[in-house]
Image: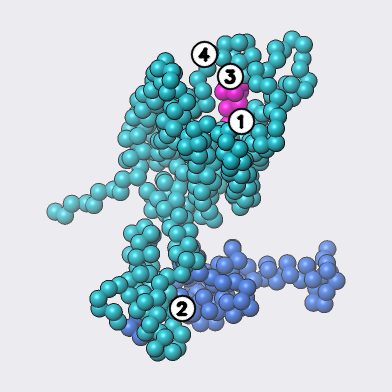
Amino acid sequence: MNVDGPDLEDRYRRVLRLLPGYYRAHWEDDMVAAYLDSRVTGDEDEDDYVFEFGRPAWPEIASVAALAARLYLGGAGSPRRYFAWGQAVRRAVLAVVLVHAVQGLTDLTLLAWRRHQAGWLPAPLAGPVTGTWPVVLQDIDCAWIVIFLALVLGYHRAARAVAALAVAADLVAMLQVQSAGIMVRPLAWWSIWFLLGLAPVLAMAAFHADAPPTGRRSWLLAMPCYYLLVPVPVMVIQATGNQAWLPDSAGLGCLVVSLACLVHAPRALSRSHQRADSGVWSLALTLLAAVAGAWRVVSLGSYLRDPHLINVSLTELFILAVAVALVAPDAVAQITPPPHPRPR
Amino acid sequence: MTGQAFFVLTALADRPRHGYGIVREVAELSQGRVGLKIGGLYGVLDRLAGEGLIEPDREEAHEGRLRRYYRLTSEGRRALAEEGELRAATARVARARLGLAGGEAAG
């Protein structure tokens, strides 16, 4: 035994700190014993060396990290706060994927509009997409429709696989654009790719075997509702030549999340409703507000030379901050452990 | 029931085993095709314990470490028997459809 520094057992215990405290209290000693058993070779000298200098293997660390993700983003049977985190992340992921899917629907609408333009309709503002990589990016938008439907209908593994492909294709397209030297403000582009592409795909780990089924009907209904309430009015405003009144995508994201927070605020502020589900929605909206706010901030670089647009963007951020402040206390209450009863 | 859970319950069907004992037994049962990681194993054990299908049997000291053994509950035995029957029936139908020996006529 090495008395001067950590040995293999200490290193395994350090890795297991990734797991929530309640889980470690129950399983840690048992897991450490199993890990150490798995390293025994039967050769005394070799075992002494391994137990003193050996390190946990990367696949072992990865399996603990996967277990930690499943426990922190809890499903049925998890402690209340971890279940709340799991439900909130699942809803936030569904909301982001919904926005991507509706963007795909919008792309398809514009395609159909251009090809079969009715005489009474004005031409769409956005011109046809040309060039290999813009077409690839548009196809990726359409793939999100499949990902959204797969997530809602419970085909989680298929959704994760297609989403990973979509994000990887997005990555290749962006690398191509950057290597061609035509990417303006790469930091903003990569930040947005992380926020709206990679992070939601990683967060799909919340859709594990213990996750309760998604409310299929509500989420399936959300797609046409969101399409009619956001992209259709946007397309109408653009087609009628009033696009100067429209916020950009990041601003639109801030306003949509702010509106959702305001709609939910009466429930979040009320004490008479069933707290659990309201708190989960408050937490999901707080996560979405963080994403929308970060998106707005990283996009500000586009307007550095236009004080008016900077002011508009800061106003959008202010509206978002006020709206999320209405639901954030409910979200915090949901993930705060209940106080221990005071001893008499 | 997931494939991993089925293998873990099967590993515990004849006698109680400790964590690493289950990993070795699953590898043997699956002829090396299922390599359970310890992290994955304890995810499965936690779920099975939560569903009341397994329970702790005893603890034994071994080379300075405390090994905890697990066994099937009566509910676990029933669940394993049902799942085993379902998988065997599916395998019989598959063999029949492939025209292999040991299959049964599918209706």
Q: Residue at x 61, y 41 (%)?
A: A176
Q: CA distance from mark 1 to mark 2?
A: 50 Å
User: Amino acid under label 3?
Assistant: Val
Residue A79 visible within the image = yes
- Cα–Cα span, label 4 and label 3: 10 Å
Q: CA distance from mark 2 to mark 4?
A: 65 Å
Q: Quadrant of residue A294?
A: top left
Q: Residue at x 60, y 23 (%)?
A: A231
Which labelled disc corresponds to residue A38? 2
In the rendered structure, which disc, 2 or 4, sits on the residue that comes first in sequence?
Answer: 2
Looking at the rendering, in which quadrant would you find the C terminus of chain A?
bottom left
Magenta part of the chain: A220-233
| Residue that numbered label 3 is attached to | A234
Q: Are marks 3 and 2 in contact (CB under 8 Å)?
A: no
Q: Which chain is cyan?
A: A
Residue flagged by tag 1: what amino acid is it? Answer: Gln
State the SS at label 4.
helix
Give the color of chain B as drawn: blue
Tell me the amino acid under the disc marked 4: Trp
**Disc 4 residue crowd, few under 14, some 14–19, many 20+, Cα 10 Å:** few
Q: x, y percentage for residue B22?
A: 51, 76
Q: Secondary structure at mark 2?
A: helix
SS at badge 3: helix
Q: Main secondary structure of the magenta part?
A: helix
Q: Quadrant of residue A172?
A: top right
Q: Looking at the rendered structure, which numbered label has been put on residue A245? A: 4
Above or below, comparing residue B100 to residue A205 in the picture: below
| Res. A103 mark | 1
Distance of mark 1 from mark 4, alpha carbons?
A: 20 Å
